[in-house]
């Protein structure tokens, strides 16, 4: 407790004669573009693959997207009817993780993943497929954050494949997290 | 209308190393119908001391200049860096000083004065076809916001302004920096010079930058004309030579 | 970390001479970052974003006591254990306790400049803990035993060949292995570490007071892994890293990404609320250490307090033509480049860091890049002024300044100086200056006559009515 008391006392002393600054509001930007179009465009620019599909045809699309994957790890939130018929593997071994997103952001090409869905599935497999409902796609990050309900223990915002240019300034994908990100928007 | 009168503040580096730029500035201003004074007793704006933290040494020089240029209608400097010293940093050096404020408001870099005050954008065609590399002195560019003025005047005189990826990067002069950290300063000059396009003349508003770059050019055995902006602007008006 | 900032001039010169490849690597990388930043700022109303970010941080800092207490309260409600650290020793105590209680043998670390300040790695190693830096660049320099040379790209000074050699010696990869192959080797080694470490250590980009949310930005996924897999997560947070409201993240996350790398958002952002809830994967225990280590002293400083707005994006480093020649090592402390030059004297004391504010030409490029509009050139001048007032300038400089003032304050002496420049031996005081100038630029070549002498002719020409 002592360190805290001393630190706060020093802070108060430092601020004694300093004029207080006001806290500005954040204006909500207006986006003329259709957020879904923008979202898919941004995903592409970020090096991710974006698709949109009618919910009824989603399973067919997934089968098409996922040839050659011998199995997958599944997030808890992925509805059973949308699970492609792949053997379930633990995230440590699975070549693919399939997650259910809490929301998405168009302007940044981002999917938001809750700890509730399963963190290992989001991070350990080298490829990651994320399902998100169209009505959960917000135009801006600010809007998405303003509409968020109770916060999960961890929220991961993923905006593309894991990457690094730390080795000789050459961009390399899949350094630690998934090197491939596929996003399917359900309409 | 009464004739416009400006006081020329040549500043120490141009006085000593680019005297011809001062002559050019006087001729050009006169040709444009401006009366030019050269207040006696002027030396240095104080920037070398100020930038190195020696405000005690810089302050008396600032005060001298308030006196020397106090009466002037406009003060024109053929140097962006010194103009910024007078316009911006005298106010920090002499907080609350009304004369410093008055001087600040009437002080201009030469090309800035021509375009913004005189409204002159065309001087002549004396630079027709001349390939020019323009170095943006940092204080002209970022403190005075003088960016388009020199380019406009050069271009309108027929000069061909060559694209230069490092045109807006610092050359590494930096006053005392050039001698306190000479290795870094020279590495910066080399970055400017290795990217320099095939120009016939290298120019800038600032004598310090040009002194540094021309010294480095000569040291590397490169032969390129280096001329202060004022000199080129006079050539733009009067034709070359 | 032991500070060697006083040796900046010697170290910068030595590096340029002995390791010219560093200049090439750093110039290339920073110009690339800088171009990306310019493009990313060009897409938005950067002026308005930066102005707003500055205002939010100024509000935070001028109400810091309130927000610190609020953050602590929220963190505790979220099940996070909160510690306050004035010194590295305070921070070490937290780690010692965690290591002992959980029998920690292995720790994975997400890149954090603050943990460099606090000497976290040497401490853990002294406790017998195996520490893995997991950011790829940070891992490279850990293998080499070097400190980071850039806030965002700790290994930007390393050319590919050096990394190929390192991996060849260390892991037996071929000397010509591609960056792709090298990264896969690092991925394998570090994946094993992630899966077996008991402790994950991170810094934080932001800590939201309103919700107790830790926000961390990255591109590799190593931060998400470091804060998700081990049983315990310890986050070190500088006092200035707070944000008032959760919605402030809507500005600060994208703005920082744009400034740092030119991205619209970092590839991964972790927004952490505390330990895993029942049935969830994630750490059982989360600790937040609120670190002062010189920050309250800086807050007290009537001018330099503004550097506490810094979000550690590295944009000023990328924009700085001085930094570009050497990278961060010669600066001799955790924070290098323009922000280091104004932050380090505040954190270390001017006496320990006085050459750093002089590691700049005052070109102003840093200020245009800064996402929170820290007036870096103005603060460089402030520190320089204080250094001169405190007598920290070298003796030759003091002598030269005295001579300079004498000459410039007297038109008579100035004329004498003029003549001396054109032939007479120059004043002794100025000689070291002259030598330093002429070594790389050749002899000074004054105009045949100074302008003030030519003026006489110009004046007469005018009086004779010859304007041209």
Image (cartoon, rainbow, N blue to C red):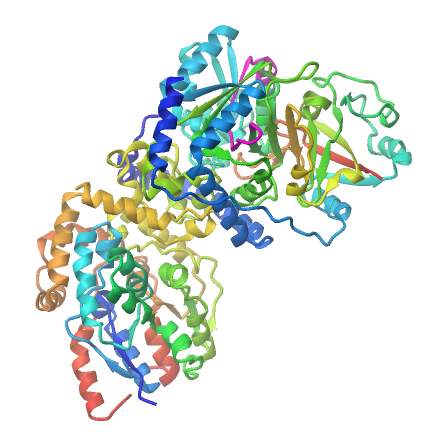
Query: Relative to C371, does residue A77 appear above or below in the rendering?
Result: above
Looking at the image, which residue is at 14% across and 64% down? C421
Based on the picture, tell me whether residue C202 belongs to the magenta stretch: yes
Residue B230 placement: quadrant: bottom left
Looking at the image, which residue is at 40% across and 71% down? B200
User: Observer-nearest residue: B35 or A51?
Assistant: B35
User: Observer-nearest residue: B32 or C286?
Assistant: C286
Image quarter in which the N terminus of chain C is found: top left
Residue B24, percent from left and from top: 29, 78
Magenta segment: C192-213
Image quarter in which the C terminus of chain C is found: bottom left
Residue C93, percent from left and from top: 41, 14
Looking at the image, which residue is at 33% across and 46% down? C379
In this image, C361 relative to C111: left or right? left
**Residue C20 in view in this figure:** no
Residue C252, percent from left and from top: 55, 41
Based on the picture, tell me whether residue C325 belongs to the magenta stretch: no
Residue C299, percent from left and from top: 36, 36
Query: Relative to A137, does residue B210 appear above or below in the rendering?
Result: below
Looking at the image, which residue is at 34% across and 52% down? C362
Query: Total number of numbered labels?
Result: 0
User: Observer-nearest residue: A169 or C270?
Assistant: C270
Question: Residue at the bottom extreme?
Answer: C465
Residue B21 placement: quadrant: bottom left
**Residue B188 in view in this figure:** yes
Residue C283 placement: quadrant: top right
């Amino acid at each position: 407790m002592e360190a805290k008391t001393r630190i706060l006392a020093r802070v108060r002393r430092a601020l004694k004669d300093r004029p207080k600054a006001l806290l500005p509001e954040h204006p909500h930007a207006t986006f003329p573009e259709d957020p879904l179009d923008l979202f898919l465009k941004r995903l592409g620019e970020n090096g991710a693959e974006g698709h949109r599909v009618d919910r009824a045809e989603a399973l067919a699309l997934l089968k098409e997207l996922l040839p050659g994957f011998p199995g997958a790890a599944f997030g808890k939130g992925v509805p059973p009817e949308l699970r492609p018929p792949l053997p379930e593997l633990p995230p440590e071994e699975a070549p693919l993780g399939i997650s259910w997103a809490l929301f998405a952001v168009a302007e940044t090409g981002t999917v938001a993943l809750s700890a509730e869905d399963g963190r290992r599935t989001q991070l350990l497999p080298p490829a990651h497929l994320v399902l998100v409902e169209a009505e959960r796609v917000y135009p801006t990050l600010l809007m998405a954050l303003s509409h968020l309900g109770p916060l999960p223990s961890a929220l991961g915002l993923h905006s593309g494949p894991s990457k690094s240019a730390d080795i000789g300034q050459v961009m390399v994908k899949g350094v630690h997290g998934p090197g491939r990100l596929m996003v399917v928007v359900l309409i | 209308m009464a004739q416009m009168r400006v006081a020329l503040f040549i500043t120490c580096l141009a006085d000593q190393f680019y005297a011809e730029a001062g002559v050019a500035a006087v001729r050009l201003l006169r040709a444009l119908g401006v009366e030019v004074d050269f207040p006696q007793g002027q030396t240095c704006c104080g920037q070398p001391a100020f930038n190195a933290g020696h405000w005690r040494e810089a302050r008396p020089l600032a005060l001298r200049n308030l006196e020397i240029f106090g009466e002037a209608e406009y003060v024109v400097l053929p140097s962006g860096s010194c103009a910024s010293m007078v316009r911006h940093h005298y106010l920090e050096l002499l907080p609350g000083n009304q004369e410093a404020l008055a001087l600040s408001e009437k002080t201009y870099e030469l090309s800035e004065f021509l375009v913004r005050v005189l409204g002159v954008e065309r001087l002549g065609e004396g630079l027709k076809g001349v390939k020019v590399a323009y170095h943006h002195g940092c204080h002209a560019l970022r403190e005075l916001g003088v960016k388009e003025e020199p380019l406009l005047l050069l271009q309108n005189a027929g000069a061909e302004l060559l694209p230069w990826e490092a045109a807006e990067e610092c050359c590494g002069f930096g006053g005392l920096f050039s001698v306190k950290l000479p290795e870094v300063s020279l590495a910066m000059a080399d970055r400017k010079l290795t990217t320099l396009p095939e120009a016939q003349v290298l120019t800038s508003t600032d004598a310090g930058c040009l002194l540094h770059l021309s010294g480095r050019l000569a040291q590397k055995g490169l032969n390129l004309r280096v001329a202060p902006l004022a000199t080129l602007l006079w050539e733009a008006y009067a034709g070359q030579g | 970390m032991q500070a060697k900032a006083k040796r900046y001039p010697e170290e910068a010169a030595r590096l340029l001479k002995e390791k010219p490849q560093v200049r090439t690597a750093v110039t290339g990388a920073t110009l690339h970052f800088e171009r990306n930043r310019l493009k990313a700022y060009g897409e938005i109303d950067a002026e308005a974003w930066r102005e707003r970010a500055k205002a939010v941080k100024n509000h935070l800092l001028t109400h810091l006591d309130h927000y610190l207490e609020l953050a602590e309260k929220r963190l505790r409600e979220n099940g996070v254990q909160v510690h306050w650290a004035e010194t590295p020793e305070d921070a070490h105590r937290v780690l010692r306790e965690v290591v002992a209680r959980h029998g920690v043998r292995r720790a994975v670390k997400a890149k954090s400049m603050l943990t460099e300040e606090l000497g976290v790695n040497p401490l853990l190693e002294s406790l017998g803990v195996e520490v893995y830096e997991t950011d790829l660049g940070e891992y490279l320099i850990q293998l080499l035993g070097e400190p980071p040379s850039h806030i965002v790209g700790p290994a930007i000074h390393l050319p590919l060949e050096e990394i190929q050699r390192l991996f060849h010696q260390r892991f037996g990869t071929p000397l010509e292995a591609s960056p792709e192959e090298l990264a896969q080797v690092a991925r394998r080694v570090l994946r094993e570490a992630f899966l077996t470490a008991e402790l994950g250590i991170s810094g934080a980009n932001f800590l939201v007071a309103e919700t107790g949310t830790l926000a961390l930005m990255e591109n590799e996924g190593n931060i998400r892994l470091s804060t998700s897999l081990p049983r315990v997560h310890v986050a070190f947070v500088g006092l200035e890293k707070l944000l008032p409201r959760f919605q402030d993240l809507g500005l600060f996350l994208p703005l920082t990404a744009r400034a740092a790398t030119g991205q619209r958002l970092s590839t991964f952002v972790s927004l952490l609320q505390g330990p895993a809830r029942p049935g969830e994967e994630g750490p059982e225990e989360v600790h937040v250490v609120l670190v002062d280590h010189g920050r309250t002293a800086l807050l007290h400083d009537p001018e330099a307090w503004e550097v506490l707005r810094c979000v550690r994006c590295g944009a000023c480093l990328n924009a700085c033509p001085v930094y570009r020649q050497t990278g961060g090592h010669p600066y001799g402390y955790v924070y290098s480049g323009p922000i280091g030059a104004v932050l380090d004297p505040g954190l270390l004391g001017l006496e320990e860091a006085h050459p750093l504010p002089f590691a700049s030409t005052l070109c102003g490029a840093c200020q245009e890049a800064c996402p929170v509009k820290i007036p870096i050139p103005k603060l460089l001048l402030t520190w320089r002024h204080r250094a001169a007032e405190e007598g920290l300038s070298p003796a030759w400089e003091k002598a030269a300044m005295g001579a300079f003032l004498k000459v410039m304050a007297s038109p008579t002496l100035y004329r004498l100086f003029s003549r001396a420049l054109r032939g007479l031996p120059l004043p002794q005081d100025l000689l070291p200056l002259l030598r330093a100038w002429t070594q790389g630029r050749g002899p000074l070549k004054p105009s045949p006559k100074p302008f003030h002498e030519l003026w006489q002719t110009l004046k007469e020409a005018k009086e004779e009515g010859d304007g041209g």
